């Protein structure tokens, strides 16, 4: 796995790459401390399935520059700009948490460039449980009003992982490093933007109602023990969209690619390789 930097729309962007074959972009979520590093344990398994695996720190995350526009809509458009910078006409997408929405949106609007999508632990793509109120208001944008301590970072990771033994000292230091300084400032900007305006059109049809419209192969993967009634809502999604390709993975919370790295690689890697 090789670390690279590239300039995209005036921003210095870090990305990792491994393997050869059809390109697959791994899109991390939006929780404080998220970065392309969340995928480092998955590169080799996916690349071994004949895929060119690429993961970038989205603007405002990791070692990439902070953008002037903190919106999800900007980061959605940026995926295409990043693809252009790498001279990728097409790329399959794996979107974790909030980035599952990014991946599905791009498939709906630019299906000619996105031949396949895997959604990983994106709660907002599941219908709400009747009577439980509106879930996923922040869609994984967890974090506090003050820069986190090391223990704050540990607690956030523990909420996202079924297997707490995966939180090694090195993992904890990396996640904390990506939660402070300019990344914390970007997190605050995203929080302010989310509080002041609503993304998208107020009368827009929610994405969980549009899964049947996605014009490319789509697979959804969730941890059975994930937050927000994920397992119950997954059953509702299948009822709403018969034939929906949805998988629940046991003994997994929000970071499915950590809790069940081998099963994640088998479900997503084989699926995307088959669609080449």
Image: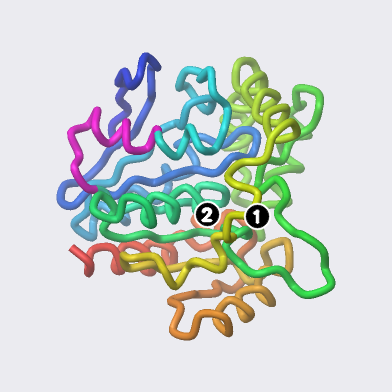
Residue labelled with disc 1: 161
Foreground residue among 224 and 138: 138
Q: What whole-number distance in Å separates the C-alpha atoms at marks 2 and 1?
A: 8 Å
Which numbered circle lies on residue 235? none
Magenta-tinted stretch: 78-90
Q: Residue at x 57, y 32 (%)?
A: 71
Sequence-earlier tag: 2 or 1: 1
Q: Quick check: marks 2 and 1 in contact, CB under 8 Å? A: yes
Q: Is residue 3 left or right of residue 70?
A: left
Find out whether residue 82 is within the magenta segment. yes
Q: Residue at x 63, y 35 (%)?
A: 172
In what element is the residue under mark 1?
loop
- Residue 155 x %, y %: 76, 42
In what element is the residue under mark 2?
helix
Q: Residue at x 44, y 84 (%)?
A: 243
Q: Is residue 210 above or below residue 48?
A: below
Q: Is residue 165 left or right of residue 145?
A: left
Find out whether residue 38 is within the magenta segment. no
Q: Quadrant of residue 77?
A: top left
Q: Quadrant of residue 170?
A: top right
Q: Residue at x 36, y 55 (%)?
A: 107
Q: Quadrant of residue 138?
A: top right
Q: Is residue 166 left or right of residue 74?
A: right
Residue labelled with disc 2: 258
Foreground residue among 156 and 276: 276
Quadrant of the snapshot with the N terminus: top left
For the stretch drawn in magenta, the main secondary structure is helix
Foreground residue among 212 and 119: 212
């Amino acid at each position: 796995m090789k670390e690279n930097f590239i300039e995209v729309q005036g921003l210095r962007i870090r990305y990792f790459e491994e393997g050869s074959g059809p390109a697959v972009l791994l899109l991390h979520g939006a929780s404080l401390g998220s970065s392309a590093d969340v995928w480092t344990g998955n590169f080799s398994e996916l690349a071994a399935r004949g895929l060119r695996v690429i993961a970038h720190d989205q603007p405002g995350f990791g070692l990439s520059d902070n953008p002037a526009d903190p919106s999800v809509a900007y980061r959605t458009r940026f995926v295409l700009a990043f693809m252009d910078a790498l001279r990728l006409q097409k790329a399959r997408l794996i979107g974790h948490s909030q980035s599952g929405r990014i991946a599905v949106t791009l498939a709906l609007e630019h299906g000619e460039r996105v031949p396949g999508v895997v959604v990983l632990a994106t709660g907002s793509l599941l219908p709400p449980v009747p009577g439980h109120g509106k879930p996923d208001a922040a869609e994984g944008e967890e974090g506090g009003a003050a820069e986190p301590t090391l223990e704050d970072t540990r607690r956030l990771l523990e909420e996202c992982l079924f297997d707490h033994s995966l939180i090694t000292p090195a993992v904890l230091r990396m996640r904390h490093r990506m939660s402070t300084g300019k990344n914390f400032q970007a997190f605050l900007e995203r929080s302010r933007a989310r509080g002041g305006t609503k993304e998208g059109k107020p009368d827009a049809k929610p994405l969980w109602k549009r899964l049947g419209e996605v014009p490319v192969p789509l697979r959804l993967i969730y941890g059975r023990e994930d937050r927000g009634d994920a397992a119950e809502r997954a059953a509702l999604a299948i009822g709403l969209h018969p034939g929906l390709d949805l998988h629940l993975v046991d003994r997994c919370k929000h970071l499915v690619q950590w809790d069940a790295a081998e099963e994640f690689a088998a479900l997503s890697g084989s699926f995307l390789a088959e669609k080449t």
